[in-house]
Image: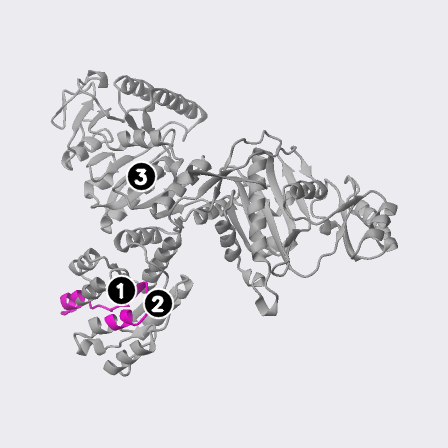
Amino acid sequence: MAIFEASMDMAERHDDANQESLDRLFRPHSIAVIGASTTPTKIGGLPISFLLANGFAGKIYPVSQKAGAIQDLKTYPSIGAVPEQIDLAIIAVPATMVSAAVEEAIAAGVSGIVLFSSGFAEVSEEGAHAQAELVAKVRAAGVRLLGPNCVGFMNIRERVFATFAPAVTQGIARLGRIGLISQSGAYGMYTYALARDRGLGLSHWITTGNESDVDFADVLAWLVDDPDTDVILGYMEGCRDGSKLVAALAAARAAGKPVVITKVGRTAVGAEAAASHTAALAGEDTVFDAVFRQYGVYRAYSIEEFFDIGYAVATAGKPAGNSLAIYTVSGGAGVLMADAAADAGLQVPELSAEGQKKIHDVVPFASARNPLDITAQIINDGSLLKSSLETMLRHGDYHMVGAFVLAAGRSPLEKERTEQVIAVRRNHPHVVFCVVGVFSDPIRIALEDAGCLVFEDPTRAVRALGALARLASVEAGARQAAALPASIKLEARTHTEVETLERLAAAGIPVSPTHLVASAAEAGKVAAQAKRPLVAKIVSPDITHKSDVGGVLLNLSGEQAVANAYEQLMESVRKVRPKARLEGVLLLPMEGDGVECIVGVQRDAVFGPMVMLGLGGVFVEVLGDVSFRRAPLTRTDARAMVHELRGRDLLFGARGRPLADVEALMTLLVAVSEFAIAAGETLESLDLNPVLVRPQGQGVIALDGLMVGRGQDAQEGQCLERDA
């Protein structure tokens, strides 16, 4: 399919006006609290208390008709009565009063609103209608709205505490370079408390609530542009605008800012599994997982992992590669860490022969390969930690080091040992250092200030290093765009394999040559012209999986055999499916050796067309060995899909098999994704099954296909991402 390259890239597509409006929301210089409370511990009093106690430099205006002063601040009966310009309005009133409060805030010229109030789309249809009316009002006025039903936000650097989160009363998280987003207010408060107690430095903490206006993707895109944020942690429950989320994730990747997301919910998308192998396998969670992989997001499956990765990136940065030096004073811990490294996909290369000799010259009984077990001899020789660790890094090609030092961080020599580690760290600034052991708080802080990760659990430490290596492998930089010059429109029905293969062939996708015959005589004539044995398949819009009803016959040669096959197929299928519409028999040539795969497309309600690659042909659902990516694919995406298959060795010459034409398979994946984009909203699903991947240099060919159209107008002018 013809495409042309354009200069605009995905990272530049997010709305600059959106970023500017969020600047005004999240960086206010003056704040009014509508529904301010005289009780500092109530929802309407907590933001004022937090702002006063934690050094907000701007003006604070309590708005209430019940008091002359609140927390020693002059109170105004309405926001319109405030004589000065107000940037942000925090609204903490009952739902019945919200509409009037929003209108007053708009009339006062605010740039942003934080709406704590609940009782909207989260409770009823009536509430959803009221929420929609609020959104219409703020958008008409150019005002940004966070909420309703949210806990607000914190801008730690500028001391903006537009929140009622009780966790703030126990202390403020230290200033750092991690931005934290949560769709859940309660979970957001929990993660804030954990981040604070673990000593993680935050730049911003933002909860999005009902996301009536500002949503998760908006905040993510804003944090990508924020100069005070280097790492973004997010908690997600769902997404309504997949394109906007993808644009934000692409911008983060282009900026080189790691994104770690915990996404909850594993509900299946509810597709009709009988119609499509791809639909049966494209559950909602599978789709999110694929999008995260495609755009370099690290998906965390526990709160521990969520913070471990955020901490690791913020403290140590990303390594230049994935090779790990394991240094230990315990053989058992070294084996544990080596096992964890294998699970995390890290390389543990052996120390050079020269390096091993230098270690053995000092400690003859040490295990000097990798892991390097220096043994308890370190207790007798106070300088051994520094010298042996230095030897390991000078005589091995390592991007990371994990050093297990037992309880050295709480021994009488803790300060001396810490200084040794820091000295080696300074000599190797491009190596990521991780120290594992038991440490006093001053020692841990000293190590972290020097850029060293500190863990008590060896396995958690190695997993964090593995995550850093994965994040480092994500290509920073933009992907160029290309646009399709024309669209494809499909009818809203199931298209037979004949129609499907004809459509794909016209799009330049390699498919098997086919002949649809309507009689035994016609089948015989085709056989007379055939140069190799044929396959015969029943054709019916009512029969999706033909082999399940005896609708396929293989390796047919000669006119009579093929004519008989026609009669046999028609008769046997009529017995099994008497009401099925039979349109004839499809004849196509038998193919030779190759690896059977399936290539499919399934339209996701949030992210649009998702492309699938799987091994096993008709057994793909049994094997479950599949990979997904959001269309359009780049060649890099296609390559990643191939390598994600558990059975990929079948394509790369396992057990003496010839190498398969993987490059041709990648080309097919890209072409199918472009077909899906061209079909736009009119394509529901597509299965090419099986796709035969022939030996290297011989290409690929789709032997069968099934397409389901949706019949809506195709989207015009869509853009394709391409590798730069």
Few, some or many residues within 10 Å of mark 2 (<14, 14–19, 20+): many
Residues 243 and 431: in front is 431
Can residue 36 be seen from the camera position used here?
Answer: no
What residue does disc 2 label? 337
Q: Quadrant of residue 326?
A: bottom left
Residues 576 and 178: in front is 178
Calculate the distance from the C-alpha at mark 1 to the C-alpha at mark 2: 10 Å
Q: Which residue ends up furthest to the left in the rendered image?
A: 72
Few, some or many residues within 10 Å of mark 1 (<14, 14–19, 20+): many
The magenta segment is: 390-419
* Kind of residue indicated by mark 1: Val
Residue beneath the point at 40% across and 51% down: 474
Residue beneath the point at 53% across and 55% down: 642
Q: Which mark, by number, is residue 225?
A: 3
The location of residue 555, given as percent across then percent down, is 78, 58
Residues 614 and 483: in front is 483
Q: Is residue 81 left or right of residue 653?
A: left
What residue does disc 1 label? 436
